[in-house]
Amino acid sequence: NAGVMQNPRHLVRRRGQEARLRCSPVKGHSHVYWYRQLPEEGLKFMVYLQKENIIDESGMPKERFSAEFPKEGPSILRIQQVVRGDSAAYFCASSPAGSSGNTIYFGEGSWLTVV
Amino acid sequence: KQEVTQIPAALSVPEGENLVLNCSFTDSAIYNLQWFRQDPGKGLTSLLLIQSSQREQTSGRLNASLDKSSGRSTLYIAASQPGDSATYLCAAPETARQLTFGSGTQLTVLP
């Protein structure tokens, strides 16, 4: 499977714990995006990263959320001290260049449930 | 700021019908628009990408049109099948790196 791979697919965390979501982009893609889909809402952009750089994090909550895309390995979305409102589906996408004019490829998502 | 609206929110049709899903966007200075399909508990599958220079794009039984001047796009599905049941999402660029999604149209095709 050469698509965007996300894991875990489902994650349950207690309030106050940390959640780490991983994303391996399509082979050869150097641009990664994270989107969040809250229950009954549309997908919202969170962050756009290139290798070792955060390019646009305008959609990322200011506190508790961080993202990285190291030179080696998957992109990680990290949520510290999770709260019930963080329960959502988190989708990763990748593209070979900026998404303008290019189709981006989405993963199957990571469903986070905070209890 | 780009806003994307999709109408209707839900649609139920008998198998074999042709149908149209609507998408409107507020910022017409877009360079492309995409339609996606999302199955329950799954990720998004890109269906069609229309460049701003195109008026429509076709893939099999799907045809998407784009009218930038009116800020509208439509997705036409011909001869619908139960396997077409899914949520259809329209997305317009906010910037070169961000997509703004509509809330989707949940389609049910009844056998």
Image (cartoon, rainbow, N blue to C red):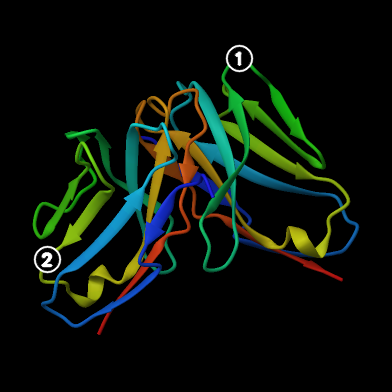
Residue at the (65%, 18%) spot, across then down? B54
Circle nearer the viewer, 2 or 1:
2
Residue at the (10%, 60%) spot, across then down? A64
**What's under tag 1, amino acid-wise?**
Ser
Taking the image as shown, residue B46 lies to the left or right of residue B109, namely left
Q: Position of residue A53 (x, y in %)?
A: 17, 33
Q: Nearer the viewer, residue B23 or A91?
A: A91
Residue most toward the top?
Answer: B53
Mark 2 touches mark 1? (CB < 8 Å): no
How packed is label 1: few (under 14 Cα within 10 Å), some, or many (20 or more)? Answer: few
Q: Quadrant of residue A79?
A: bottom left
**Tag 2, which chain?**
A
Residue under disc 2 on the same chain as residue under disc 1: no
Residue at the (68%, 21%) spot, across then down? B55
Spatial CA distance of label 2 from label 1 is 44 Å
Identify the residue position indicated by label 2 in the image: A80
How packed is label 2: few (under 14 Cα within 10 Å), some, or many (20 or more)? Answer: some
Q: Nearer the viewer, residue B67 or A105?
A: A105
**What's under tag 2, amino acid-wise?**
Gln
Q: Nearer the viewer, residue A1 or A82?
A: A1
Taking the image as shown, residue A77 lies to the left or right of residue B52, namely left
Secondary element at image label 2 = loop
Q: Position of residue B87 (x, y in %)?
A: 61, 59
**Tag 1, which chain?**
B
Q: Position of residue B33 (x, y in %)?
A: 54, 31
Identify the residue position indicated by label 1 in the image: B53
Secondary element at image label 1 = loop
Q: Position of residue B48 (x, y in %)?
A: 64, 36
Residue at the (88%, 63%) spot, across then down? B15
Residue A1 in the image: above or below residue A104: below
Taking the image as shown, residue B83 lies to the left or right of residue A53, namely right
